[in-house]
Structures are given as C-alpha cells and as structure tokens.
Image (tube, helix red, strand yellow):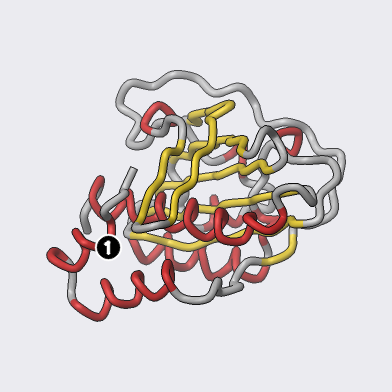
Amino acid sequence: MVTTLIVILAVLLPGGLAFSLYRYLNGPVPDPAVALPAKKSTPEPAEPSTRPDASIDDAEFGDWNYRLGDVAFKAQKVSGRTYDSCAPVDRQGTLAENGCERAVQLAYSAYKGHLTAVQVIMSFPTAKDAKATAQQLASSSRAVKWSRDKMLGKYVYGRIRSDATNRYVVLTAVTADRTAQARAARFHQHLHADHLGYFLFRDPA
C-alpha cells in the first residue's frame, strides 16, 4: 500500500520525521506492543451498515502485499467491516469520551493461517483527540473491542500496537503459532506502520 513510504517521506516530510520512521522500520524491532489480553467471551460487534459519505471504509484496504527494500510480506484480507459510529468497538466509553466518529475493522491471515491480524482504525474530529486516545490505549488496550474469533485460539505470539497519525488511531493485534513465531514481530511492526503511513497521504493534516 505504501511500499515506497520512506522514499516519499524523505521528500515530503521534515528530515527528522522521515528519519524516525526509517529507523522504526529498519532498526531492531522495537517493542511498544502490549501483550494480548486473555480471551473472554464478549458479544460480537453489531453488523455494520453502509454509508456512502463515510470518511473511512474497509473497502480502502484489500490484501496486504508489502515490500520495502528486501523486506516483503503478504497477507490475505479475510474480512472487513465499516461502522457508522465507534460504539460497536468502544468497550469502556473511552472512544466516545474523545469524540470518536467512525471505525473500520479488518482481519488478515498469513502463512497459511499460522498468523492472524486484526486492525481497528478509528477516526476523530482532530489530531489532538486521536493522540489523546492513543495515549490512553497504550495503558489499556481493553478499551477497544474487536473480533476475537478472527485471532488464533492458541498462540505463542500475541501482541497489540496502537498509535495515532493525524486524526486517526490504528490498533493492530497479531497472533501467531510456533510455525510463524519467528516472523510475527517484524510482520506486526510493518503492517502497523504501513497503515499508519497510509493516512499521512490519504488525509494530510
């Protein structure tokens, strides 16, 4: 999706920001991710309705075919939902408190099902609202509800990343079994960063 992200950023963005993203993707895998909480029985989010004027839509995201230098990943999009509000993914009221407007939920499968990923992408009125939400999610990822049935029931890698970009927050949860364990952290890092980068160009500040 943003396969030439760093090259383009180097031209369009201040040097410090481009260099920071370059180091994020090319340095040792940083570990801001938090452990996936234990699975609990929770109701599934309501089925989404279609709204043509929605600012974000799951149809924007297809299969993930990613390449950056010698790094390449592929994942099949197995489901996508678009919500007219953030209520279906707001577990604790945190999103409502920060004015969350709409949400998208995506599910991916890679390495023949040995790795799964779910992303929840949320839009907010301002970048300040999005940043405040991301800071809260850093200490409590339970504030966001996603489809746990799209994740592996048994896994050795289970982590969550969440960050803000412009007026959006991206939360990425990944599980992997032993077969895909060695590739899970780097996959997680690049999927999360790629979709964060997407919003730098889709909706410039």
Residue nearest the observer in this picture, 88 or 19: 19
Residue nearest the observer in this picture, 58 or 167: 58
Q: Position of residue 199 (x, y in %)?
A: 32, 50
- In the rendered view, tell whether residue 72 sits above or below residue 80: below
Q: Residue at x 41, y 49 (%)?
A: 195
Quarter residue 187 falls in = bottom right
* Left or right placement of residue 109 versus residue 52 in this view: right
* Left or right placement of residue 27 versus residue 126 in this view: right
Q: Amino acid at mark 1?
A: Ile
Q: Position of residue 167 (x, y in %)?
A: 35, 56
Q: Residue at x 43, y 56 (%)?
A: 71
* Left or right placement of residue 184 versus residue 165 in this view: right
* Left or right placement of residue 169 versus residue 151 in this view: left
For the N terminus, give its image quadrant.
top left
Q: Residue at x 61, y 42 (%)?
A: 118
Q: Position of residue 162 (x, y in %)?
A: 54, 60
Identity of the residue furthest to the left in this view? 11
- In the rendered view, tell whether residue 44 sits above or below residue 194: above
Q: Position of residue 188 (x, y in %)?
A: 57, 55
- In the rendered view, tell whether residue 82 sits above or below residue 180: above
Q: Residue at x 20, y 78 (%)?
A: 15
Q: Secondary structure at mark 1?
A: helix
Q: How many marks?
A: 1
Q: Which residue is mark 1?
A: 6
Badge 1 local density, few (<14 within 10 Å), some, or many (20+)? many
- In the rendered view, tell whether residue 93 sits above or below residue 30: above
For the C terminus, give its image quadrant.
bottom left
Residue nearest the observer in this picture, 101 or 62: 62
